[in-house]
Amino acid sequence: MTTMESTDKQQHTVSGAEITLDGVSKIYRGQQAPAVDNISLTVPAGEIVMFVGPSGCGKTTTLKMINRLIEPTSGTISIGGENIRAKKVDELRRTIGYVIQGGSLFPHMSVAKNISIVPKLLGWNTSRVKDRVDELLDLVGLDAAKYRDRYPRELSGGQQQRVGVARGLAADPPVILMDEPFGAVDPITRQRLQDELLSIQRELHKTIVCVTHDIDEAIKLGDRVLILQEGAHVAQYDTPEVVLSSPANDFAQDFVGAGSSLKRLSLARIADLELKTPTTAKVGDSTAQVRSRAEANGDGSVIVLDDRNRPLGWPWLRQLTGEKIVQPSGDLINLDSRATLNDALDTMLVSGHGGAVVTGDRDAYLGVIDFKTVTDFIEEMQREAETETKAAPAAGSDEHPASRISIAPTDEELDGGREG
Amino acid sequence: MWDFVVDRREQLLINAWNHAYLVILAVLFATVIAVVLAVVVTRLPKVEPVANAVSAAGLTIPSFALIGLLLPVTGLGDVTALVAVTFYAVLPILRNAIVGLQGVEPGLVESARGMGMSEPMTLLRIKLPLAWPVILSGIRVSLQMSMGVAAIAAYVLGPGLGAWIFQGLTQVGGKNAVNYALSATIGIVLLALILDLALLLVGRLTTSKGVRV
């Protein structure tokens, strides 16, 4: 597993570079009002910063000025302290990953060719490129042997998007720009892709700037959230916690929207909660032994893992037939440990087990989160909020974020929370 | 007629060969010219309607008339034939090449540029391969059409099977008039089918599996 080793090495040496925007403006030809009006901003190295705002607020323009797809009318942008105008534009772009909606894969190139574009532009030799492609496919959770020679149209939307992320990471750039990366996939796939991005970021520590119009996505993924209003005026630039608990102005308040208390479920990560560890089995284990182990633990179902500890399925005991454990059919929806309680509730609702399987780096199995753990946690949050309110009644208006958390959110509330 | 063909098989084969050669050469030139023009046209949005109008109007010029117009410039012979056939061959390819290049999704081009591909590289590695199936179908139309135009080109002593058709026409009522005209015509039709098949094969080999229909 040489590919795994090389990633482990990179984990500590490579991290992102700081991006600074200083008084950057963009006025499109023939327009009076600037699309971006004098924005100054620092994106710290190794963090994910989410640009969020209504359409036409200039967030995409701001993003594209960083890789010079759009040239600013005035102001300077630098990456790692170096002005982006110091390099030739194509050379600059080869050091910045760029991921856009749907993955935007080139349909006439295989998955491997798509991923290897930038490494080849940089003159890597063939064997290095090949190793890198396999490593990246592994990183984004696709089986390299199975997928490297496929064409984009032979992949699902989620798989295409994964390849798009792999392509953005291909030459190991310190900075990655993403433009509505998960806009074109269904909600469950989107949640999974978000989880994977967080898991990848935990390994790589890149500087990621990501544009979205979805405040929930911004809160979930961002180390910091930048809320922009028309003309790319900064309404608020802060951590998700602060953005939710104290919006800087009316615009931010409106944008974060009603039900922000429910959104706070998006701040608590599964990693903060205790996981259950029910009986597990590997493919190829003796069914009889697994059954007796499960019965000894009092479990009605077991979690089947593959040889690299990734969960494959969660069958009930009665579904275990045959002498050896085989790969279960059906798709298991698992959660990354960085996923939010919101995601956890969503996933549990579609799972028949009243719980969800939690995974860590590279989809390795960590444990199970069950409904009771989540509701207990919410109750605890509520109790804490109440004591806080009693201690400081002045702050305890009915706008207090935590005071409105209901133990069992209704479907309506969940939907509202998702759409933001 | 069979005896007629067998007796003159050598001349027939030479004529067929020359006919094919003229058409292939003309279509090759036309492809290059059309693609270059299309690249220029798609970069200058103002020129595009002009190009479309020209390629539509161009096809309405009778080939006899064009050949007549060319005579004072290029004289009798192969060059006039080649120029005339190439002129007609350009038109369908040009139209398809413009459509094909415009059909490339802007997001893909932006992606390519955003990854650090230069503009010529984006053209060669992204735009043209993606537009290729459409361009190719233009080339097929062009090839079929050029077969007929090349026959007319025999009027100015161009090479190919057209010569026998004209010979047949001038000898109407003569013993071999029908034989001349018919064998040349059938020859052209057969040649057209063979070349179309060959082009189909070329298309299969040059179109990525990822965009094949």
Image (spheres, coloured by chain):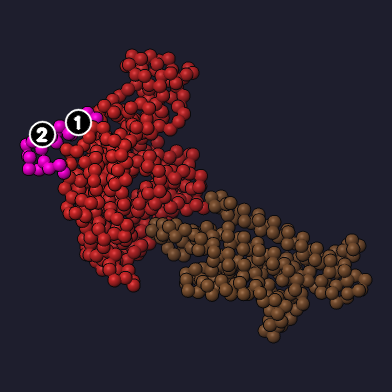
Query: Residue A82, image x and y in percent?
Result: 25, 60
Colour in which the image shows chain B: brown
Which chain does the numbered disc 1 sit on? A
Identify the residue at horizontal 36%, vertical 17% (top origin): A294
Separation of disc 1 and disc 2 at Cα? 12 Å
Q: Which residues are magenta?
A: A375-399
Instruction: Give A400 or A2, whichever is nearer the viewer.
Output: A400
Q: Quadrant of the N terminus of chain B?
A: bottom right
User: Type of residue at label 1?
Assistant: Glu
Q: Are marks 1 and 2 on the same chain?
A: yes
Q: Which mark is residue A387?
A: 2
Is the Cβ of the residue at disc 1 closer than 8 Å to that at disc 2? no
Identify the residue at horizontal 90%, vertical 70% (top origin): B176
Element at label 2: helix
What is the crowding at mark 1: few (fewer than 14 residues within 10 Å), some, or many (at least 20)? some
Q: Is residue A385 magenta?
A: yes
Relative to residue A384, is residue B149 drawn left or right? right
